[in-house]
Amino acid sequence: MAVGLTHPTIGLTTAEGNTEVVNWNPYWQSFDSNPIGSIHTFSKNDLPRNYLALNGGIISRGDYPKLYTVMEDVMISDDSWNSNPEKYSDGDGSTTFRLPRITSPATGTILAVKSD
């Protein structure tokens, strides 16, 4: 483990023969089995794959069909979302939906939802 890094490092050899040192976090693997739609807290700089920050972003139903299916019964209209930003909205009504905007109570962290 390199000094000053919070995660183990792995030396990867590129096609050109160069070695690149990358951070690898075994902690991320433990999140792969969480159910889609579950919410977790992460460091702002350490969001695992298959998680989306709950920042009010509009995302494609086609890109995240499982998350959309799990959440579609609790969505509100996008017109109502500004007064209820902690909820999912139906986005444009056909191809997108909106994530909740929820601020993490802990400094330096974000809340994220498990996606597809």
Image: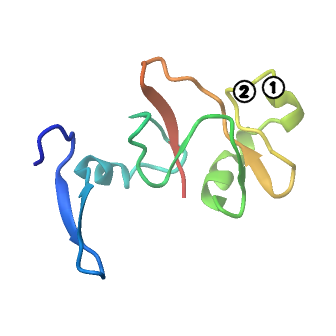
Q: Amino acid at mark 2?
A: Pro
Task: Provide residue 30's location: percent of width, then percent of height.
Answer: 29, 50
Residue type at mark 1: give it: Asn
Quadrant where the image shows the C terminus: bottom right
Who is closer to the viewer here, 74 or 39? Answer: 39
Which quadrant of the figure has residue 86?
Answer: top right
Identify the residue at horizontal 61%, vertical 58% (top origin): 66
Give above or below for 56 relative to 23.
above
Mark 1 nearby-residue class (10 Å; few <14, some 14–19, many ≥20): few
In the rendered image, the vertical position of residue 40 relative to residue 73, given as above or below = above
Hey, which quadrant is residue 71 in on the image? top right
Marks 2 and 1: in contact by CB < 8 Å? yes
Q: Quadrant of residue 76?
A: top right
User: Would residue 60 be found to the left or right of residue 40 on screen?
Assistant: right
Disc 1 target residue: 82
For the residues marked 1 and 2, what is the alpha-carbon distance in whole angstroms?
5 Å
- How far from the left and from the top, in percent, is residue 94? 86, 56
The front one of 62 and 69 is 62
Residue at horizontal 21 percent and vertical 39 percent from the top: 6
In the rendered view, tell whether residue 104 sits above or below residue 93.
Answer: above
Question: What colouring does the structure picture have?
Answer: rainbow
**Residue 16 at what x, y percent from top left?**
29, 81
Q: Residues within 10 Å of mark 2 (few under 14, many from 20)?
A: some
- Which element carries disc 1, helix, strand or loop? loop
User: Is residue 66 or residue 81 the one in the foreground?
Assistant: 81
> Is 31 on the left or on the right of 112, as rendered?
left
Q: Name the residue beneath numbered marker 2.
A: 85
- Check disc 2 and report its element: helix, strand or loop: loop
Q: Horizontally, is 48 left or right of 51 in the view?
A: left
